[in-house]
Every structure is written in structure tokens, then in C-alpha cells.
Image (spheres, rainbow, N blue to C red):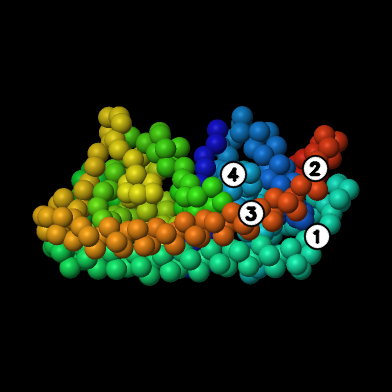
């Protein structure tokens, strides 16, 4: 059995890495070292195939794009097997596994290749940052028309409904910080349908920029953690200071920001909409500021598109370099055997 999420993202604040909270409780962290991202991804995919029949495998998708992976976590055994590139320098007690000893071509990227890739990634982050600053103008429109007292009432009522009848535990719950998607060479991507498919209750939080969706979710997360429930907090990959989803596995519910570019609608029993625009914003706001809203929307989205173009350029250089690498079946088997021997 597999579950998917992201711990890395391309954001308006630069490259984001939320790995630490997801591995803090594990007994063993293994780091796969190799100059090729594709070789590491192929190795991780083979490990997923091997372990998913007997364990629940958490698959960490990559901000590089669909053909790459950041790692896997098997909580039943307390083990993480990770791509070395996402492991923070200050992380202790990591066992490094250099699988390049089993492959023939181990050429490292040149400074020129690294420079080209980094140049376009940095350009992408600058475009996303500009887009976020423009997006703030959109928030200002709705903040000025927001009934914050009504928003607080909705939040308090929701928290009461969710926790009513649930025992309060003797210790605080744990917060896992993650993402359900990011902006990649393929544009904005997400795995929301996968994350929500087996939950009893799913709440689609609707609204506009600045209408309190993130604040609402943060308050719900805090209340669940204070009551002792482990909580998965999914950050916005555009502005990581904001939240896009809160999921509490033990209570089998989640709520998420269901607006563009990850807009969905209820399709089964147990799914409901919470619309903060309808409930807490002055009626007619969309119409009153329609011209200004459309102008700001088009402006910030133009920078988002420019960011994707730059990520595509960086991805093209990476793909060109990765073409020289491949794994034979013998190499694959030797690598898998080597990794399995390291798992305690």
C-alpha cells in the first residue's frame, strides 16, 4: 500500500524543504548517494515495489517533476530511505549509502551545468516571488470587506463539531509538515484526490485571497494538536507561510483550500463545502471590484507562468545531463541487495 505527498517545493520563498518533521520519530535514516537523480529515483521505485506488499510505504514525490523521487518512509519499521539531495546538512545519525560503486558511469555535473540549472531555478523563484507580491494586492481587496467576527464564529463552530465526543488526550499531538503539491516543470501539480480518497469526512474550503482560509485551517490544526491528535499540516507551495490542508488521521477528516489551481468539488457522501466568501465577506464584493480583481489575477498569473517556463529550462538541462545514465538489471539487483543489507 502506498501514500503520496511532497516534502520539497518550488515556492515564492525559494526552494522549500519540510523533511525534518516527517522523519523525526524514525529509528533509521538511510541516504542514497549517486550523481544521477534518475538512478536514485529508479532505485527508490524498485524499493517501493518490493515493500508495498507488506508495508504501508509513504512515497515522497519530487519538486523536480514526475520522473523523480525524494524518498520513501516505512513507519512500520521506523525506516526512511531518502535521496541524499533533500537531506539537510545539520541532520544527524544519517547512514549514507553510496550506490555509485555499483554503476559504471559516475560522472559528476560540471560547474557550468550546475550553474545553468541553478540560474533558471533562481529566475523561477524570483518570478514566483513577484507573483506573490502582486497577489497580496488581491488579498487587500477582500480583507477590507471581511467580517472577521463571523469568520471566528465559523471556526469555533467547526472545531466544536469535529472534536465533540472525542476524548482529550494527556499529551499534545504531533505536527507533520508537508505539501500536497507544488509547481514543477509540468506546472502546478497535486495529489489531493489520492490523499482524501479514504477519509470519512472531507471539507472543501472555498473563498478568495485574504478571506481567512489559511487562518481557519491553522486554528483547526492547533485545536486538534492541543487535544492530543497527530495532525498533518500541508503548506501552500506558492506561499509556504500559508496552509492549504489539515488532515487528522485518527479522526478521519481533512479540510483543504479548494480554490484555483487546486479546485475540486464534493462528489460523495461525507464531503461538504465551507465557503468563507459566502459566509464572511460583504455580499457583492466580487462584482464591486471585478475590474481590479481581474487585472490583479491576470498580472500575478503571468508571473506564475514565467516561473514555470524557467523551471522547464532548468529541467531541460537536467534531463539532457541525465540521458547518459542507465542501470543494467545486474546493477539494479546489486544495489537493492546492498540497501536491504543496511536496513536494521
- Element marked by disc 3: helix
Contact check, label 2 and label 4, Cβ < 8 Å? no
The image shows residue 285 at horizontal and vertical percentages of 15, 58
The image shows residue 40 at horizontal and vertical percentages of 72, 48
Q: Which residue is mark 1?
A: 108
The image shows residue 227 at horizontal and vertical percentages of 31, 54
Circle on res. 315: 3
On screen, residue 110 versus residue 263, left or right, reads right
- In the rendered image, which quarter contains the N terminus? top right
Question: Gap between marks 4 and 3, in whole Å?
Answer: 11 Å
Q: Which residue is mark 4?
A: 66
As drawn, 130 above or below 23:
below
Q: Residue at x 66, y 49 (%)?
A: 81
Contact check, label 4 and label 1, Cβ < 8 Å? no
Q: Which residue is mark 2?
A: 326
- Element marked by disc 2: loop
The front one of 106 and 224 is: 106
Question: Gap between marks 1 and 3, in whole Å?
Answer: 17 Å
Where residue 85 sits, quadrant-wise, is bottom right
Q: Residue at x 27, y 29 (%)?
A: 269
Q: Residue at x 73, y 51 (%)?
A: 320
Where residue 253 sits, quadrant-wise, is top left
Contact check, label 1 and label 2, Cβ < 8 Å? no
Q: Is residue 89 among the parts visible in the rendering?
A: yes
Amino acid at each position: 500500500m502506498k501514500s503520496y505527498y511532497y516534502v520539497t517545493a518550488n515556492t515564492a520563498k525559494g526552494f522549500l524543504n519540510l523533511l525534518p518533521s516527517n522523519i523525526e520519530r524514525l529509528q533509521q535514516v538511510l541516504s542514497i548517494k549517486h550523481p544521477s537523480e534518475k538512478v536514485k529515483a529508479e532505485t527508490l521505485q524498485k524499493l517501493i515495489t518490493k515493500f508495498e506488499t507488506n508495508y504501508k510505504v509513504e512515497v515522497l514525490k519530487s519538486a523536480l517533476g514526475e520522473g523523480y523521487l525524494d524518498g520513501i518512509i516505512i513507519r512500520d519499521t521506523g525506516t526512511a530511505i531518502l535521496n541524499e539531495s533533500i537531506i539537510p546538512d545539520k541532520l544527524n545519525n544519517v547512514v549514507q549509502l553510496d550506490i555509485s560503486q555499483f554503476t559504471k558511469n559516475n560522472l559528476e555535473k560540471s560547474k557550468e551545468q550546475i550553474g545553468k540549472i541553478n540560474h533558471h531555478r533562481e529566475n523561477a523563484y524570483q518570478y514566483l516571488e513577484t507573483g506573490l507580491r502582486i497577489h497580496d494586492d488581491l488579498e487587500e481587496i477582500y480583507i477590507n470587506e471581511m467580517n472577521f467576527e463571523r469568520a471566528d464564529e465559523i471556526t469555533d463552530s467547526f472545531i466544536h463539531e469535529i472534536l465533540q465526543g472525542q476524548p482529550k488526550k494527556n499529551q499534545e499531538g504531533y505536527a507533520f509538515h508537508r505539501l500536497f503539491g507544488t509547481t514543477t516543470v509540468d506546472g502546478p501539480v497535486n495529489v489531493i484526490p489520492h490523499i482524501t480518497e479514504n477519509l470519512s469526512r472531507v471539507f472543501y474550503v472555498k473563498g478568495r485571497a485574504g478571506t481567512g482560509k489559511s487562518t481557519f485551517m491553522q486554528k483547526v490544526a492547533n485545536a486538534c494538536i492541543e487535544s492530543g491528535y497527530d495532525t498533518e499540516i500541508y503548506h501552500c507551495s506558492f506561499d509556504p507561510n500559508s496552509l492549504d490542508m489539515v488532515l487528522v488521521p485518527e479522526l478521519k477528516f481533512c479540510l483543504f483550500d479548494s480554490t484555483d489551481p487546486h479546485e475540486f468539488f464534493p462528489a460523495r457522501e461525507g464531503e461538504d463545502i465551507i465557503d468563507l466568501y459566502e459566509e464572511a465577506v460583504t455580499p457583492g464584493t466580487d462584482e464591486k471590484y471585478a475590474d481590479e480583481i481581474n487585472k490583479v489575477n491576470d498580472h500575478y498569473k503571468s508571473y506564475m507562468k514565467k516561473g514555470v517556463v524557467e523551471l522547464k529550462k532548468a529541467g531541460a538541462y537536467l534531463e539532457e545531463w541525465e540521458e547518459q545514465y542507465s542501470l543494467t538489471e545486474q546493477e539494479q539487483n546489486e544495489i537493492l541487495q546492498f540497501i536491504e543489507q543496511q536496513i536494521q
